[in-house]
Structures are given as structure tokens and as C-alpha cells.
Amino acid sequence: MKLSALLLTAMGTSHITEIDWLVIAAYFGVLLCVAWWVVRKGKDSAAFYTSGAGTYTLSDSMYTEHLEYCSDRAWEGHDFVFTVAFQNDMLTQTGIESQLCERKNDEPRQS
């Protein structure tokens, strides 16, 4: 007997019972719940994303960034001064974004 005929015969004799359908439905139900949880994760009031663009100058170890655009409009038009240090292949940037730390009761962020 050929393999294809054997497979067709085996497939014709299989039956999916109500329990099988219940297990399949439960699997997809759990899958949908996990997908819903992943999509909703991070969408509460504490989650936010800020983006911006501008210009910068680098003079020796002094890095100054000027934000021309920011999704949080209170940050636009401000300069942020940092100190940078290069050691081998590592860049360390230090400074405090202190100009707007009163916004939303934020504390100054160390960079």
C-alpha cells in the first residue's frame, strides 16, 4: 500500500470528539487572553513616552543639547548641559535636567 493511501485511510478513521473541541477552544481562549494582556500592558496612567529633537554642541567634555521640539511642550526651547567622558569604548554622560524638574512633581533625573 502506498504511503498516501495509508495516510488517507488513517485520516478518514479519526474522529474529533466534544472533549477535543473543548480542549481546542480552551487553548485559543487562553491564547486570546494572553494576547489581550500583552496589548494592554503599559497602557495605564503611569506609562508615558516622551520624544524630542533638536541640536547639540560638543566642546571637549561639555555636551549641550537644545530641544527645539518635544512631545511635552514644556521642555521645548530649553538647553540641557551634560559632561561626557570617554574611556576606551565606553561613554559616560552625567548631568541633571534641572530646568523642568517641577513638572509633574518629578525629581531631577540623573543621566
Image (spheres, helix red, strand yellow):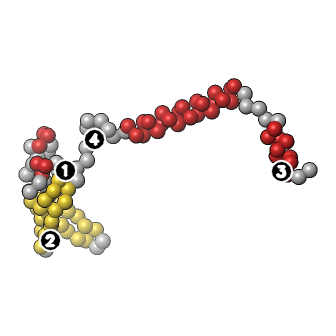
Q: Which residue is mark 2?
A: 58
Q: Which residue is mark 3?
A: 4
Judge by depth and name the residue closer to the eye, 69 or 84.
69
Looking at the picture, which amino acid does disc 4 mark? Ala
The circle on residue 60 is none
- The residue lying furthest to the right in this view is 1
Q: State the CA–CA distance, disc 1 to disc 3.
A: 62 Å
Rendered location of residue 80, percent (x, y):
11, 59
Looking at the picture, which amino acid does disc 2 mark? Leu
Rendered location of residue 89, percent (x, y):
30, 71
**Quick check: marks 1 and 3 in contact, CB under 8 Å?**
no
Looking at the picture, which amino acid does disc 3 mark? Ser
Rendered location of residue 49, percent (x, y):
25, 47
Q: Is residue 23 left or right of residue 57?
A: right
Q: State the CA–CA distance, disc 4 to disc 2.
A: 32 Å
Q: State the CA–CA distance, disc 3 to disc 4.
A: 56 Å
Q: Earlier in the sequence, mark 3 or mark 2?
A: 3
Tag in front: 1 or 3: 3
Q: Is residue 104 above or below residue 73?
A: above
Q: Which residue is mark 1?
A: 71
**Quick check: marks 1 and 2 in contact, CB under 8 Å?**
no
Element at label 3 = helix
Q: Which residue is mark 4?
A: 47
Q: Is residue 26 left or right of residue 44?
A: right
* Residue at horizontal 66 percent and vertical 29 percent from the top: 21
**Quick check: marks 3 and 2 in contact, CB under 8 Å?**
no
